[in-house]
């Protein structure tokens, strides 16, 4: 079945989407079988640059799995120059600081992160077992799960004790620093991961508007919110255009904008071979327009948080520079880096997979002058 997924996947049909649909259609498969198929598919794309083109698919998959196993046991056996030329497209070096640490992180199996309810990280880790807590303070609620259970079948999941959420996505929510009683807008809420986090941080008080262009994602958001017992939100369709979904003025807006996902290439390696520089340019324009359109909704003294799970300069610092130049009424807001206790505060933060074990992300923050 892994070979069938690979044959069906292309630029218009991402491998992770094809895989999800194929697995959903085969309900007879055990969780272990589904895990093995997923592992084979992602290993193929992660190690595609090393494979012998032209041989039958079963042999290609065997090669990819063998390379994956070898890297897990002896990562030093892969020279950095080899990783640089085979693991990523050549154009990436013009967009990203390609370090040895990042290259190795790209070839590493992704970690599975959970977000516990406030103050419950240690208790959740003890209940599930096979867990590691990311850090202290707010990061004590980020739990890495290393076991093999189907978490969706656990009583803890059905009780709303945790959400599956990457650790750096959790960091983005923490950097918003919303307060109980405030009014926030999650402008690109998707399936609701960050919205649910904002609600927990606000103690389910105040109000969050959650918008997305996709109705099916908002339906999932509503189901997740019900399971998590989150009620201080309103979900609404919004396509990112200049016409806003509400006249409400917000204490803060989170613009977790659509992006190339370059920061998730260790988790979704198929995207390495389908993303182009033109995609980045088009996405950067959409990202800037999104930021520009939410400006009227932000109160004086209100905050704007721009987050993207990409590391490309076109989608990160160039978008942030353009916004700052276009809207001088917004001044940079300094943020504390949660992974670096002694780091100076900055209005722009980078999060690399090799540092905390999460997705690569960029976060920029502004405050509207009073």
Image (cartoon, rainbow, N blue to C red):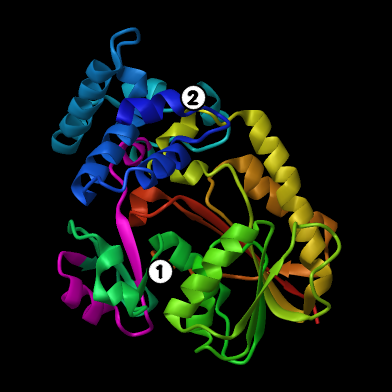
Task: From the viewer's perspective, tell me whether residue 283 is left or right of residue 220.
Answer: right
- The residue at the point 78 percent across, 66 percent down is 294
- The residue at the point 55 percent across, 25 percent down is 91
- Badge 2 local density, few (<14 within 10 Å), some, or many (20+)? some
Q: Is residue 273 visible?
A: yes
User: Does 116 lie within the magenta span?
Assistant: yes
Asked if 103 appears above or below 67 in the picture, the reply is below
Could you say where residue 86 lies in the image, as x and y percent from the top left? 38, 21
Give residue 11's quadrant in the image. top right
Give the residue at mark 2. 89
> Whole-Å distance between the Cαs marked 1 and 2?
35 Å
- Please name whichever residue, 77 or 263, is drawn nearer the observer in this view of the structure: 263
Task: From the viewer's perspective, tell me whether residue 134 is left or right of residue 172.
Answer: left
Could you say where residue 154 lies in the image, as x and y percent from the top left? 24, 70
Give the residue at mark 1. 342
| Residue depth check, mark 1 versus mark 2: number of the one nearer the observer | 2
Task: From the viewer's perspective, tell me whether residue 353 is left or right of residue 123.
Answer: right
- The residue at the point 27 percent across, 64 percent down is 151
SS label for mark 2: loop
User: Does 271 lie within the magenta span?
Assistant: no
Which contiguous range is marked in magenta?
A: 103-131
Query: Looking at this rendering, what residue extends furthest in the top direction?
Result: 54
Task: From the viewer's perspective, tell me whether residue 13 is left or right of residue 38.
Answer: right
């Amino acid at each position: 079945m892994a070979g069938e997924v690979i044959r069906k996947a292309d630029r218009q049909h991402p491998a992770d989407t094809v895989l999800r649909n194929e697995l959903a259609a085969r309900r007879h498969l055990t969780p272990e079988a589904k895990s093995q198929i997923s592992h084979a598919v992602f290993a193929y794309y992660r190690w595609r640059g090393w494979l012998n083109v032209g041989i039958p698919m079963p042999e290609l998959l065997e090669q990819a799995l063998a390379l994956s196993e070898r890297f897990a046991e002896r990562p030093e056996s892969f020279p950095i120059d080899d990783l640089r030329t085979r693991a990523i497209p050549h154009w990436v070096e013009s967009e990203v600081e390609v370090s040895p640490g990042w290259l190795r992180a790209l070839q590493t199996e992704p970690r599975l992160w959970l977000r516990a309810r406030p103050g419950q990280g240690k208790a959740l880790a003890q209940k599930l077992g096979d867990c590691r807590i990311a850090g202290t303070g707010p990061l004590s609620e980020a739990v890495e799960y290393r076991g093999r259970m189907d978490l969706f079948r656990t009583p803890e999941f059905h009780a709303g004790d945790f959400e599956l959420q990457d650790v750096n996505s959790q960091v983005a929510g923490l950097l918003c620093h919303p307060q109980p009683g405030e009014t926030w807008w999650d402008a690109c809420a998707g399936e609701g991961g960050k919205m649910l986090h904002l609600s927990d941080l606000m103690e389910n008080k105040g109000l969050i508007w959650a918008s997305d262009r996709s109705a099916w994602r908002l339906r999932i958001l509503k189901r997740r919110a019900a399971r998590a017992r989150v009620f201080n939100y309103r979900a609404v369709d919004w396509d990112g255009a200049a016409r806003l979904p509400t006249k409400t003025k917000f204490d803060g807006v989170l613009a977790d904008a659509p992006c190339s996902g370059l920061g998730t290439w260790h988790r979704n390696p198929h995207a390495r071979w389908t993303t182009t520089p033109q995609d980045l340019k088009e996405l950067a324009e959409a990202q800037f327009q999104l930021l520009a359109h939410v400006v009227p909704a932000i109160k004086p003294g209100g905050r704007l948080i721009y987050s993207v799970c990409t590391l490309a300069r076109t989608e990160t610092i160039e978008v942030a520079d353009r916004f700052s130049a276009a809207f001088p009424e917004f001044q940079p807001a300094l943020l504390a880096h949660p992974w670096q206790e002694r780091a100076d505060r900055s209005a722009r933060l980078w999060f690399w997979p090799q540092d905390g074990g999460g997705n690569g992300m960029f976060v920029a923050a502004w405050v509207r002058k009073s």
